[in-house]
Image (spheres, rainbow, N blue to C red):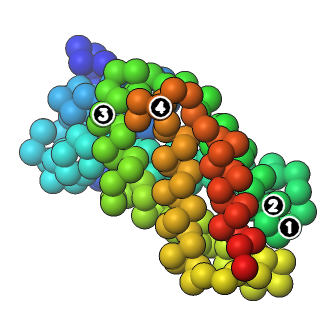
């Protein structure tokens, strides 16, 4: 990526995110100097548009989170309610764990990924908003009685899933998808 001629002349931040996303999906490092070169812009412009490398990675990962979550929603095989939410999460977590770009990133930079994925920021905000939307839709349709406020429940579910999904990166062996799903089921059905 670093020595190639510019492939396009960036018009704005969306072009930076698109090229960084392509690198991520191909399992390549997101290199700010290479991005600036390929986009035909200076590093100062690049940083002004998207912030530092970790901020750009967070945006790329947040967008990947949304694409994967939307696909999980569309492909869920359970009609509605608690089991629909659990099915969406199961499909989402398994897709995330199987994503080649994420595997490459976590092998190269596990601590950077953990910091981005488990701290407040773009990824958490997007994941919580997606979960809120799903819970609210199921609740409003009368398919999911909730005993906690949707925002609080959504962030709790995101945190439970993160903790168990990334167990292998947190020094606890393998991902614990089934444990996460069982915990979410309890959160959604507790009296």
| Residue marked by disc 3 | 111
Among numbered discs 1 and 4, the one appearing first in the sequence:
1
Query: Which of the numbered marks, if any, corresponds to residue 84?
Result: 2
3 or 4: mark nearer the eye: 4
Among numbered discs 3 and 4, the one appearing first in the sequence:
3
The single residue placed furthest to the front in the displayed view is 191
Among numbered discs 2 and 4, the one appearing first in the sequence:
2
Query: Which of the numbered marks, if any, corresponds to residue 39?
Result: none
Front in this rendered view, residue 60 or 6 = 60
The single residue placed furthest to the top in the displayed view is 3
Among numbered discs 3 and 1, the one appearing first in the sequence:
1
| Residue marked by disc 4 | 172
Residue displayed at 71% across by 46% down: 90
Per the model, the C-alpha gap separating discs 2 and 4 is 28 Å
The single residue placed furthest to the left in the displayed view is 44
Front in this rendered view, residue 151 or 173 = 173
């Amino acid at each position: 990526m670093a020595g190639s001629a510019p492939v396009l002349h960036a018009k704005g931040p969306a072009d930076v995110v698109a090229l960084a996303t392509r690198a991520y999906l191909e399992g390549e490092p997101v290199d700010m100097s290479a991005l600036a070169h390929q986009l035909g812009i200076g590093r100062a412009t690049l940083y002004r548009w998207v912030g530092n490398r970790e901020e750009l990675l967070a945006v790329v990962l947040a967008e990947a989170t949304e694409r994967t979550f939307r696909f999980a929603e569309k492909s869920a095989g359970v009609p509605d309610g608690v089991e629909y939410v659990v099915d969406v999460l199961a499909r989402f977590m398994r897709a995330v764990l199987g994503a080649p770009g994420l595997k490459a990133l976590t092998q190269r930079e596990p601590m950077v990924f953990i910091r981005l994925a488990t701290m407040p920021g773009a990824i958490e905000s997007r994941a919580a908003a997606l979960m809120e939307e799903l819970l609210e839709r199921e609740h409003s349709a009368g398919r999911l009685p909730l005993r906690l406020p949707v925002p609080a429940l959504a962030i709790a579910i995101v945190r439970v899933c993160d903790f168990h999904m990334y167990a292998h990166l947190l020094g606890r062996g393998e991902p614990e998808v089934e444990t996460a799903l069982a915990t979410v089921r309890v959160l959604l059905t507790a009296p």
